[in-house]
Amino acid sequence: MTRVAFLGLGRMGVGMACRLTAKGHDVVVWNRSPRKAQPVLGLGARLAKTPAEAVTGADVVFTMLADDPASEAVWLGADGALAAMKAGSTAVECSTLTRRFVLDLAAKVQARGIRFIDCPVTGRPDVASAGKLTLLVGAAPADLAGMRPLLEEISETIRYFGPVGTGTAYKLMINLMGAAQIAALAEGLVMAEKLGLDREEVVKAIETSASASRQVVHHCRRMAERNFENPSFTTGLRHKDAAYGADLAREVGGAPVLGDASVAWFAAAKKLNADADEGLVIEAINQQSNRRKTPTGTLTG
Ligand code: NAP
C-alpha cells in the first residue's frame, strides 16, 4: 500500500483520487473547495486542511489543478506541498501547465531530493473516473519505471516522450490542434445554419465525414443543438490550453496562425461564460458573424 496525497479535486482530479482510493492505497486529499472531496471521502480517503498537511509522510503526491497560478499556489504558496514533502518521495504533476513553469517547478522539486514526473493527461472526466486516461509522461526513465505500477492504476495508456517537460510539450501541441478542430467545427456549423441546411442531415454527415475527429464527433450534435449541459471541459480551460500552446509554438519558432485564431475564439467564448462547456464557442462565433461585415468579409467587432 502506498501513502498517496492527491491535491486538486476538480472534474478530473476527483475521479483520479477515487480510483487510487478504491485500489486500496492510503490516500489523503486536499482541495481549495473542500466540499468537492465528498465522493473520495466516501471511499475512505482522509481530508487535509492544507496541501502541506496532505503531503506530510506521503510517498507520492499527485496534483491536478487548473493552471500555472493554481499549481504555483499549491506547490510553493503558504502551507504549500513542496516544503512539507519528504526526500525520496515522488511528485506527479498532472495539470496542463506551461512548459516553462513545469521545468522551473521540476528544478525546485528535484533540488529537494524528490523525483518529478511531468504527467499531463488526455481523456475527459468519465475516462478519469474509469481509470482509463492516457498519461503523457516526461521523466527520467528510472523515475517512470518506479512509478509505473501506480500510474497504471489510473490509466489505460502511458506514453513516454523523454525528459521532464516533454510530456507537457506534447500535451500543449495536441490540445492546440484540438482547439483548432473545435473552433473549425463551430465555424462550419454556423455557416451551415446561415446556408439554411437541414440540421439533422448536417450533423449526421459531419459525424461520418473525413473531418470527423473524436473532438468533432464529441461536440457536433451538442453544438448544433446548443446543448451545453454537463460541461466536461470549460471555455476557460480550453482558452488557457490554447494560449499556452500557441505561446510555446512561438517560443520554439513556430507560426501558430490557426492556433492564434483558436485562442481568439475561445477568449470570446470565455468572455460569454468561463465556466461553460467549451462548445459555447459556437455562440461566440455566431454572435460575431451576426455583426456587420466589411466588403472583404473581415468581421468587425
Ligand atoms: P476544474 O474542474 O476546473 O478543476 C480545477 C482544479 O484547480 C480545482 O481543484 C480547483 O479548486 C483548483 N484550483 C483552481 N485555482 C486554484 C488556486 N488558485 N489555488 C488552488 N486550487 C485551485 O478543472 P479540470 O477539468 O478538473 O481540469 C484540471 C486540469 O486537467 C487542467 O489543467 C485541465 O486543463 C486538465 N485537463 C482537463 C480535462 C477535462 O476534460 N476536464 C482533460 C485533460 C486535462 P476549486 O475546486 O476550489 O475551484
Image (spheres, helix red, strand yellow):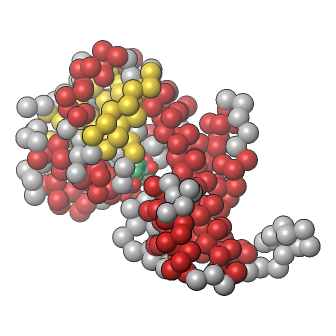
Using residue 131 as the reference point, say whether residue 274 is left or right of it. Answer: right
The single residue placed furthest to the right in the displayed view is 295
Using residue 248 as the reference point, say whether residue 238 is left or right of it. Answer: left
Q: Can I make out residue 280 in this image?
A: no
Residue 244 placed where, x, y %? 58, 43
Residue beneath the point at 48% across and 27% down: 166
Is 248 placed above or below 177 here? above
Is 149 placed above or below 74 here? above
Nearer to me, 35 or 216: 216
Residue 183 placed where, x, y %? 61, 61
Question: Which quadrant of the figure contains the N terminus?
Answer: top left
Nearer to me, 29 or 82: 29
| Residue 266 figure quarter | bottom right
Residue 277 placed where, x, y %? 46, 67
Q: Can I make out residue 227 in this image?
A: yes
Question: Which quadrant of the figure contains the C terminus?
Answer: bottom right
Residue beneath the point at 31% across and 36% down: 157
Is 88 placed above or below 53 here? above
| Residue 291 figure quarter | bottom right
Residue beneath the point at 62% across and 36% down: 248
Residue beneath the point at 31% across and 30% down: 91
Nearer to me, 281 or 39: 281
Residue 41 placed where, x, y %? 13, 55
Picture mark count: 0
Using residue 134 as the reference point, say whether residue 99 is left or right of it. Answer: right
